[in-house]
Image: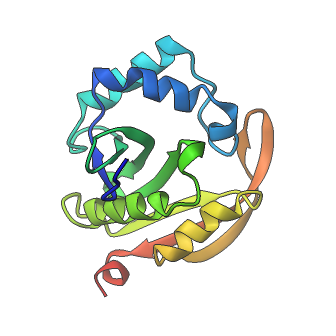
Amino acid sequence: MVNDGVKLRPLTEDDVPAVHRLLGDMKVIRYMLFPLFDEQAARDFVRESAADSDGQRGPSLVRAIAFADSGILVGLCGLVLDRDRLQGEAWYLLDPDYWGKGLATEAGRHLLAYGFGPLGLHRMWAMCLPQNPASARVLRKLGMRREGYLRKHLRIHGVWRDCFLYAMLREEWHA
């Protein structure tokens, strides 16, 4: 399959099987706040995400990470928005078959461009666990700076986890 990179697009009902495959795989979500999804949870997630497909109304924006040439969904990403403070928390996950190929970094660039562009955010941030150095590399490649180390900050799958905090300001993105 020829790959011309990835694009971000709203989720559609046709994405339910792929979303279930991703969010129903502990290998994919082991470092994420997502619970393990069954098919109904995936269907509900897609429906709720599609309801605010432009990200202008709700508290979060979810996008499919899809190959630009074929539209095949290979991951998910999004922003949890704090509109009062013009901030957003970025997140992403990929199908393990596509790890290490630069797709998360490319998707992250699209996500930052949308957050600092049409959404008009002042600051975007992301967290990753120390056990996930690949995610930390993605955040550094995006130009985000490590701002802190938060002890036992996130409860992931029943265990309190430390995490790194990375962030970027709009003026840093445009520089």
Answer with left or right where residue 72 lies relative to residue 155: left
Residue 10 location, x and y as percent? 26, 38
The number of callouts visible is: 0
Residue 67 location, x and y as percent? 33, 48
Residue nearest the observer in this picture, 51 or 22: 22
List the single residue furthest toward the bottom.
Answer: 175
For the point 44% across and 74% down, which residue is it?
168
* Image quadrant assignment for residue 84: bottom left
Q: Quadrant of the C terminus?
A: bottom left
Relative to 27, residue 43 above or below: above
Answer with left or right where residue 49 lies relative to residue 32: left
Residue nearest the observer in this picture, 71 or 117: 71
* Image quadrant assignment for residue 172: bottom left
Residue 157 location, x and y as percent? 74, 33
For the point 23% across and 57% down, which residue is it?
119
Answer with left or right where residue 19 lies relative to residue 59: right
Residue 121 location, x and y as percent? 30, 64
For the point 26% across and 60% down, which residue is it?
114
For the point 40% across and 63% down, which residue is it?
106
List the single residue furthest toward the front.
Answer: 1
Q: How are the residues colored?
A: rainbow
Relative to 160, residue 26 above or below: above
